[in-house]
Image: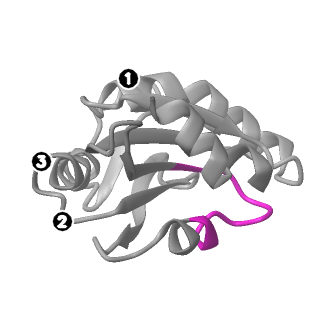
């Protein structure tokens, strides 16, 4: 099966290079602020749905998490330590809003650990069911 721009995750399939490549670009080259991943159920693969430019903000990122659909996302969070030293942390977000379909929530939940393992360099994981669980204050508190 040809899986251009996707990452297969069901039934022992491999994770496609494009998903890992975009993550590595975020991690090593900082060419993306965030990556939003979507599971395409019919093709049984994860695709890169949205890439955030380095200048995009937290608000831009949150705007790409749909209110009624699940997603995986990676966010490069910049912050200052108590000593005013600039740092960053790479967050993995498992977005599963309460209003999403039960089948979708089950697929995302059962695939999450396997998919996350393919993204080497995740520093913090967040599981969120509503916007307050991915609030900027949550990022700040989990970054340290």
Q: In this view, does 127 lie to the left or right of 79?
A: right
Quadrant of residue 94 within the rendered picture = top right
Q: Is residue 5 magenta?
A: no
Quadrant of residue 131 within the rendered picture = bottom right
Q: Is mark 1 on a helix, strand or loop?
A: loop
**Are the residues tagged 1 and 2 within 8 Å (C-beta)?**
no
Q: Mark 3 points at which residue?
A: 28
Tell me where the magenta segment starts and ends, as one range.
62-72
Quadrant of residue 84 within the rendered picture = top left
Which mark, by number, is residue 12? 1
Q: Is residue 12 left or right of residue 23?
A: right
| Vertical arrangement, residue 86 with respect to residue 65, above or below | above
What separation in Å lies between label 2 and label 3 (alpha carbons)?
8 Å
**Number of dots carrying numbers:** 3
Closer to the eye: label 3 or 1: 3
**Of the image marks 3 and 1, the number of the one nearer the N terminus:** 1
Residue farthest along the front direction in this orientation:
83
- Residue at 48% from the left image edge and 50% from the top image edge: 73
Which mark, by number, is residue 84? none
Q: How is the image coloured?
A: one colour
For the stretch drawn in magenta, what is the main secondary structure?
loop
Label 2 Cα neighbours within 10 Å, binned few <14 / some 14-19 / many ≥20: some
Q: Relative to the observer, which residue lies in front, 75 or 22? A: 75
What separation in Å lies between label 1 and label 2 (alpha carbons)?
30 Å
Residue farthest along the right direction in this orientation:
99
Q: Name the residue under label 2.
A: 31
Q: Where is residue 38 in the image (x, y as percent from the top left)?
A: 52, 56
Q: Position of residue 143 (x, y in %)?
A: 46, 34
Q: Is mark 3 on a helix, strand or loop?
A: helix
Q: Quadrant for the C terminus, please.
A: top left
Q: Is mark 2 on a helix, strand or loop?
A: loop
């Amino acid at each position: 099966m040809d899986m251009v721009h996707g990452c297969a995750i069901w039934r022992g399939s491999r994770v496609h290079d494009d998903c890992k490549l975009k993550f590595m670009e975020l991690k090593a080259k900082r060419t993306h602020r965030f990556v939003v991943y979507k599971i395409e159920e019919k093709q049984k693969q994860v695709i890169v749905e949205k890439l955030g430019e380095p200048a995009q903000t937290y608000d831009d990122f949150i705007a790409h998490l749909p209110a009624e659909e699940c997603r995986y996302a990676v966010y490069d969070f910049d912050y200052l330590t108590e000593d005013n030293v600039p740092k960053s942390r790479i967050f993995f977000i498992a977005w599963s809003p309460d209003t999403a379909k039960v089948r979708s929530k089950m697929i995302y939940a059962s695939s999450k650990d396997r998919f996350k393992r393919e993204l080497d360099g995740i520093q913090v994981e967040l599981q969120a069911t509503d916007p307050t669980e991915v609030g900027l204050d949550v990022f700040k508190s989990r970054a340290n």
